[in-house]
Image (cartoon, rainbow, N blue to C red):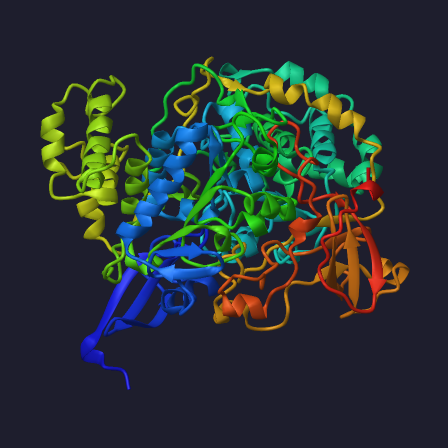
Amino acid sequence: MKNSEAESVHYRTCPLCEATCGLEIHTVNGKVTHIEGDKKDPFSKGYLCPKGFSLKELHHDPDRIREPMIRKGEEWFTVSYEEAFKEVRKGLRGVIEAYGKDAVAVYLGNPNVHNLSGMLYLPIFLRALGSRNQYSASTVDQIPKQLAAELMYGGDFSIPIPDIDRTKYFLCIGANPVVSNGSLMTGPNMRGRLQDLKKRGGRLVVVDPVRTATAKLADDHHFIKPGTDAYFLFSILHTLFEEKLTKEDYLADHVNGLEEVKELAKAFSPESMASVCGIDSEAIRMIARDISSASCAAVYGRMGTCTQSFGTMNSWLIDVINYVTGNLDREGGVMFTTPAAGGKRTKKKGYRFGRFKSRVSEMPEVLGELPVACLAEEMETPGDGQVRAFVTVAGNPMVSTRNSNRLEDAVSNLDFMVSVDCYLNETTRHANVILPAPSPLERSHYDLSFYQLSVRNISHYSSPVFEKKDELDEWEILLKLASLIGDEEPNEDAVTQLDDATIQFLIAKDVKNDQSSVYGRKSEEIMSALQDRKGPERMLDYMLRTGPYGDQFTNGEGLSLSKLEQNPHGLDLGPLQSRIPEILLTHTGKIELAPELIVNDVQRLKDEMANQPDMMLIGRRHLRSNNSWLHNLPVLMKGKNRCTMLLHPTDANRFKLEDGGTAEVASEAGRLHVVVEITDEIMPGVASIPHGYGHGLKGTKMEVAEQNAGVNTNLLSYEKRLDAVSGTAVLNGIPIAVRNVTQGRNERDNVRSEFV
């Protein structure tokens, strides 16, 4: 029987995906009893997907790591933080002293952007380390989008967001927002939002190789051959220019490069592109006409458009189409958010691209990090600068990165590895030390990243539901790591000193910046106003109060952390507003419509036009799955096996495969055996295997994941097949061979010679 006297109710946002849904969490005597959607949340209004309910199981998961661990041989031992940090300093300092800081590589996983501590304190650790070998999940799936924004608008988070609640025409390419909850388009209940679009007389058109959950809602769905989105998008542009459907006077004073784009589009008529992309030329022209004639329209592309050979070009073309049809920075089109915190930008002296290169393949840096496609070779290849130590923070690259077998072999030969994580998974099993990450319910939360990508301007702070016992928060772990890699042994107060120094540095910089709201103020006065807080709360309070809605430390009515604490359901700060030219931070102060880096890649697009493999592999996602790290929760893994290969009946017939049978799939990187699911919801010539599986390897401790092991589709992705601009390895459009096998297991044979 529920003890109502001991029951507490907590309100917070869900940190498990980009939707930022409001939660109502019921607890009794330190245990979660019930989770439901927060009906008073102004953004999600009670909506909650299955992942939100899983926070209960995540918090109480017996497999979750709660104490520091050290590996000796193949055995793990629980130790104190003191002993764990001593071992980390010994391991990292040993490598740094012998080989330099670049000999330490860092990989940051997807959960870090859902984590206030990670967003605020990882940069401090990375600066203290000073290694060029920084990698993240961003170069697995989204850097093309960020790089296009950097080149066009001057900021990697200056990404135009569909004004989905007001648009009248929505073209969705290579994206499935009903399942992803709106990737790089933060908005809870995307199904409801798209249904509202149709109710107000709008149109939804989906272009995708699969009839996805989003496509099933659409007025029109067009199959497209994987990897050919750039040809389709260019043919849209060609039609707009040829039929004089553009609105070239719109924002004309704020744009460079329109004539160059017109010239590039001439080579891509719908008639010549129809056979390349698999969409009828008249259908292409009709889509272009509909975008132009709609009172307002938004073109949106995401994972499918990013993770292919022309990911950066696709991201650029989508924004160009939005501009030339008059839908950029316009109500009902695509707009820029005005985030309450974390939205400050400064004009660039140059692009954050190619400022240094990787040692082996000379792949250029992108937005401060190297493409993860080159990580394994940096570990394998002897010589000055070889990576000999590895730090992972909330990441599982052995499952989530391309040609992951190669990375696993490389990691097994390192001198030292430390992981900050909550599971003993396929990656952390290789670590010498694991430092435990707290449960999401044991830490505060604010969506710094996703409120910069939101379909409305929203602000919502979440207090911890439970107090930590003897565990450190991630911000404390990261500051401790930053302090211990220095030349001198850190003292007991190192974390506090680094935390104080960080906020003091931010304040000192802003009071000297004539663009800051606290310009000319006294640092001591501002620091005094923050003295009752520390850690992420102090940093967040400062950012909120100096942000566009903040009280600017004047005791006014503006936004502050205290005000958010008084509004536990969050605050709606209003719909998106026009922000050009304010948002433009390029060196010219204009939209650069024809960035040289992308323009120069058009010739590669033309050269590869005739390259049409017989069978191609793409990924897919399920509403209950968020890459690999939620596969240990029974509530998310129940039901039928979702790690299957979708195959069209035509292809199943020619490969003599039956539903539920086993196929061998081979690529230039490797081969595996997978269960077949036959469906007419995928186009002929295409196969689809979900991303993030491949569990149950020796040395892991994730019981539920082991029971739902699946196959690792990244065994089939060759890290040298990539988007030449951003360095993002190809996940969608992998050439494959398929054959029937009676039974089998995952194999690690290298079959690259079959595909060269």
Tell whether 633 sits left or right of 123: right
Q: How many marks?
A: 0
Q: Is residue 41 left or right of residue 467?
A: right
In which quarter of the view is residue 139 placed?
top right
Which quadrant of the view contains residue 468?
Answer: bottom left
Indicate the position of residue 466 as horizontal and vertical percent values.
Answer: 25, 62
Q: Viewer-proximal residue, 689 or 34?
A: 689
Please report the residue visible at 73 percent of the width from the left and 43 percent of the height from the top: 733
> Considering the image in quadrants, where does the C terminus appear?
top right
**Where in the figure is residue 712, as x and y percent of width and height?**
64, 55
Residue 572: give x, y in percent of width and height.
Answer: 32, 47
Q: Residue furthest bottom?
A: 1
Residue 458 visible to the viewer: no
Depth check: give the residue in front, 245 or 225. 225
Closest to the observer, 245 or 348: 348
Picture quarter with the N terminus: bottom left
On the picture, is 703 further left or further right than 130? right
Dividing the picture into quadrants, the one containing residue 734 is top right
Question: Which residue does the image show at 29% across and 72% down from the upper left?
Answer: 31
Is there any visible trace of residue 236 in the rendered image?
Answer: yes
